[in-house]
Image (tube, rainbow, N blue to C red):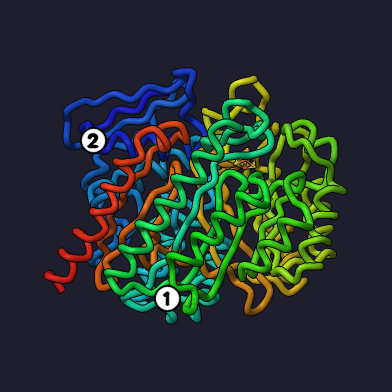
């Protein structure tokens, strides 16, 4: 396959689009050429030229909005026109429409919301359908999410912020994992963890001081990773105490700790979380099939996930459960059975992920093949089951290389939508993040400006170059100083 583009500028987004349609592969089966001719693009696939890719930049037929691009990856009107023309060629050549059409970005629902706020619901629906080729069921999903988020959207204030605490350790590494997460069984990790906890407490203290100096208001706290409950009860106690000491929790609406791996959960740890005011935990079975769990390298059984859930219930937590569609060895029927079991258990939140095959994951490196036909994996049946059980979709995001170009969606029972997930995915307010790999996201409350401040990715770097972690917190003060002057 060959695609000739008018210039280099649009290469990135067109590559994303080719990947979305499944015609761009790492094996070099597809090549992109830059012709330098600003008037046309040409797609050649399986020996056929798709003529109507020509003169696409001047394609005037596609619907346009006055400020149409918003948060999508597509950067300007020329690129949108090119994407639309290439999209039509790819539809014709492959006979497929990706679920989210031409949208290749992480946050299609944020784009939907922003367009609704500017142009109204009808125009946004039509734009998603006609200009971006989004399938009707995904437009309906985006609209439902927009409606279900409204109460939380209205709560956020210019002073609002959330706190993220990153724990990059897990019991073992899952085959599909692409995060920087270290197995706690390694002796190197065992040596590192005490120093990591100590430095993280220092970072929390410093960050709390900055938040206080700026008069920010804490809305939610989220311990993620990794698996925070990989730490011992004493280490968790130290960190939760640091949060309590350095932040004003009186305004905090939601406090979540991920307890994703059932093999890390104990009554002692749950009692401790409860005593520190944690109200929500995430216990992540991913599947209720023992065979699939073995294939993906999770060192626990489905029964362990059921037991961890029952224990979380004893301590009165609201519970989220994560599941992944498309795991090796699973089938659409098997996945539907896992979701049916989750529904029967009745956690407050169920999050349905589409497997993303990231290059860094063992799954991608050991040659395990993806499901034979990704089109078998539609999530509509699962969505219907969740809806009829009283769950509503409340946030959604996409990852590259995901099964069937599908999305990840959080479902919640009434009044149990996770605020942190909405704040973060819709980029509603600043998230101050602590820990290795954590990214602080600074949001101008009166505009769309977002700046990121990155911590070191690996725990040994984080511990070893910690002075830099603290000095980067000055960026928070600078950002708020600058937007204060602007506003
Ligand atoms: S539990 Fe999550 S972070 Fe840990 S190894 Fe598995 S996928 Fe990675």
Residue at 84 percent of width and 42 percent of height: 301
Q: Position of residue 51 (x, y in %)?
A: 34, 34
Q: Is the CB of mark 2 within 8 Å of ligand 1?
A: no
Between 46 and 262, the one lying in front of the other is 262
Residue at 58 percent of width and 62 percent of height: 137
Ligand 1 placement by image quarter: top right
Q: Position of residue 329 (x, y in %)?
A: 78, 34
Q: Position of residue 443 (x, y in %)?
A: 30, 63
Query: Which of the two discs, 1 and 2, sits closer to the camera?
Result: 1
From this viewpoint, is residue 118 visible?
A: no
Q: Position of residue 107 (x, y in %)?
A: 44, 56
Question: Which element type, helix, strand or loop, lies under badge 1?
Answer: helix
Work out whether 71 lies above or below 112. Answer: above
**3D distance between C-alphas at marks 1 and 2:** 33 Å
Question: Which element type, helix, strand or loop, lies under badge 2?
Answer: loop
Quadrant assignment for the C terminus: bottom left
Residue closest to the far left: 485
Crowd around label 1: few <14 · some 14–19 · many ≥20 (10 Å) = few
For label 2, the residue is 40
Quadrant assignment for the N terminus: top left
Sequence-wise, the earlier of marks 1 and 2 is 2
Q: Is the CB of mark 1 within 8 Å of ligand 1?
A: no
For label 1, the residue is 122
Between 279 and 4, the one lying in front of the other is 279
Crowd around label 2: few <14 · some 14–19 · many ≥20 (10 Å) = some
From this viewpoint, is residue 46 visible?
A: yes
* Residue 71 found in image quarter: bottom left
């Amino acid at each position: 396959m060959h695609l000739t583009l008018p210039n280099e500028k649009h290469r990135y987004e067109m590559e994303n689009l080719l990947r979305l349609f499944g015609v761009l592969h790492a094996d070099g089966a597809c090549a992109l050429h830059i012709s330098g001719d600003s008037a046309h693009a040409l797609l050649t696939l399986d020996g056929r030229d798709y003529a109507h890719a020509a003169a696409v930049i001047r394609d005037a037929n596609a619907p346009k909005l006055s400020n149409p691009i918003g948060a999508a990856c597509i950067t300007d009107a020329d690129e949108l026109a090119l994407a639309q023309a290439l999209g039509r060629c790819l539809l014709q050549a492959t006979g497929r429409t990706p679920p989210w059409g031409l949208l290749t970005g992480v946050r299609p629902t944020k784009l939907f919301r922003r367009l609704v706020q500017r142009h109204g619901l009808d125009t946004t629906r039509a734009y998603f359908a006609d200009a971006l080729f989004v399938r009707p069921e995904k437009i309906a999903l985006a609209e439902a999410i927009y409606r279900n988020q409204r109460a939380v959207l209205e709560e956020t204030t210019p002073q609002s912020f959330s706190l993220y605490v990153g724990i990059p350790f897990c019991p073992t590494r899952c085959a599909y994992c692409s995060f920087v997460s270290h197995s706690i069984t390694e002796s190197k990790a065992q040596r590192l963890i005490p120093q990591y906890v100590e430095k993280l407490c220092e970072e929390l203290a410093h960050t709390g001081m900055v938040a206080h100096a700026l008069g920010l208001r804490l809305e939610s706290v989220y311990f993620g990773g990794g698996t925070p409950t990989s730490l011992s009860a004493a280490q968790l106690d130290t960190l939760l105490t640091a949060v309590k000491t350095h932040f004003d929790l009186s305004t905090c609406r939601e406090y979540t700790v991920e307890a994703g791996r059932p093999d890390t959960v104990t009554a002692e740890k749950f009692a401790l979380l409860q005593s520190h005011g944690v109200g929500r935990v995430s216990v992540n079975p991913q599947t209720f099939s023992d065979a699939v769990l073995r294939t993906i390298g999770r060192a626990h059984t489905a029964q362990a996930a059921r037991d961890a859930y029952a224990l979380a219930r004893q301590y009165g937590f609201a519970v989220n459960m994560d599941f992944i569609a498309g795991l090796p060895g699973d089938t659409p029927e098997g996945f539907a059975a896992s979701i049916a079991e989750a529904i029967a258990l009745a956690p407050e939140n169920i999050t349905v992920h589409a497997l993303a095959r990231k290059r860094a994951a063992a799954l991608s490196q050991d040659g395990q093949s993806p499901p034979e036909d990704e089109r078998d994996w539609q999530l509509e049946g699962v969505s219907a089951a969740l809806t009829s059980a009283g769950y509503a979709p409340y946030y959604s995001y996409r990852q590259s290389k995901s099964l069937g170009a599908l999305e990840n969606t959080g479902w919640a029972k009434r009044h149990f939508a996770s605020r942190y997930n909405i704040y973060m995915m819709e980029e509603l307010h600043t998230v101050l993040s602590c820990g290795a790999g954590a990214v602080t996201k600074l949001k101008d409350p009166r505009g769309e400006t977002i700046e990121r401040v990155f911590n070191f990715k690996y725990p040994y770097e984080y511990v070893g170059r910690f002075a830099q972690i603290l000095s980067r917190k000055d960026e928070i003060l600078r950002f708020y100083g600058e937007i204060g002057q602007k506003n």
